[in-house]
Image: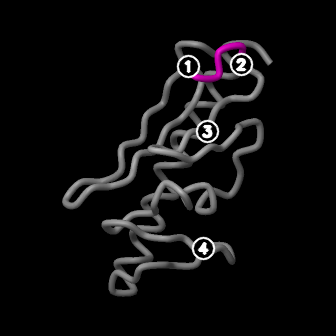
C-alpha cells in the first residue's frame, strides 16, 4: 500500500470513529444516559455521555490494518506504515461538557 492509500485509510477510520461516537451517544441519550450500552452485541462503557477510550474499538465495525492500543488515549496505528506514530487516529476521552477529542495524523503515512 502506498502513502496516499494509507492516508486515505487513516482518514476513513477517523470518520468511522466519529460516526461510531455519534451513534453511541445517540443511543445512550435515547436510553436516558446509562453507564453502558450495547452495540453489535458488544458492551460499550460510556464516560460523560460518550464511549470511553477503552471501548471505542468495540463501537467500530472494522479497523482492519490498524493496531489498537489503549492508555491515556486510544490509538489506532496503521500497521503497514514505516512511521505508525504519525499515521494513526487517536481518541481521548470526553471530559464533562466536551466531546472526546478525535485526531487524525497522516504526516508519516
Q: Main secondary structure of the magenta part?
A: helix
- Viewed as shown, does residue 40 lie left or right of 75? right
Of 97 and 72, nearer the camera is: 72
Tag 2 near tag 1, CB within 8 Å: yes
The residue wearing badge 2 is 81
First to last magenta residue range: 82-86
Q: Is residue 83 above or below residue 67?
A: above
Q: Nearer the viewer, residue 86 or 39?
A: 86
**Secondary-structure class at tag 1:** helix
10 Å crowding of disc 1: few (<14), some (14-19), many (20+): some
The local crowd at label 2, few if under 14, some if 14 to 19, many if 20 or more residues have their Cα within 10 Å, is many
The label nearer to you, 4 versus 3, is: 3
- According to the picture, the residue beneath numbered tag 4 turns out to be 39
Of the 4 image quadrants, the one containing the N terminus is: top right
Instruction: Quarter of the image for the C terminus: give it.
Output: top right
Residue 96 image offset from top left, x and y in percent: 22, 61
For residue 40, above or below residue 82: below
Structure colour scheme: one colour
Mark 4–mark 3 Cα distance, whole angstroms, equals 20 Å
Residue lying farthest to the front in this orientation:
71
* Pointer 3 residue: 76
Amino acid at each position: 500500500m502506498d502513502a496516499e492509500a494509507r492516508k486515505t485509510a487513516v482518514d476513513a477510520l477517523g470518520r468511522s470513529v466519529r460516526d461510531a461516537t455519534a451513534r453511541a451517544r445517540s443511543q445512550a441519550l435515547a436510553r436516558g444516559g446509562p453507564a453502558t450500552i450495547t452495540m453489535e452485541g458488544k458492551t460499550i462503557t460510556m464516560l460523560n455521555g460518550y464511549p470511553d477510550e477503552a471501548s471505542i474499538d468495540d463501537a467500530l465495525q472494522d479497523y482492519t490494518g490498524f493496531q489498537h492500543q489503549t492508555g491515556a488515549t486510544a490509538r489506532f496505528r496503521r500497521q503497514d506504515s514505516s512511521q505508525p506514530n504519525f499515521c494513526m487516529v487517536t481518541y481521548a476521552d470526553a471530559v464533562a461538557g466536551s466531546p472526546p477529542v478525535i485526531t487524525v495524523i497522516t504526516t508519516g503515512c
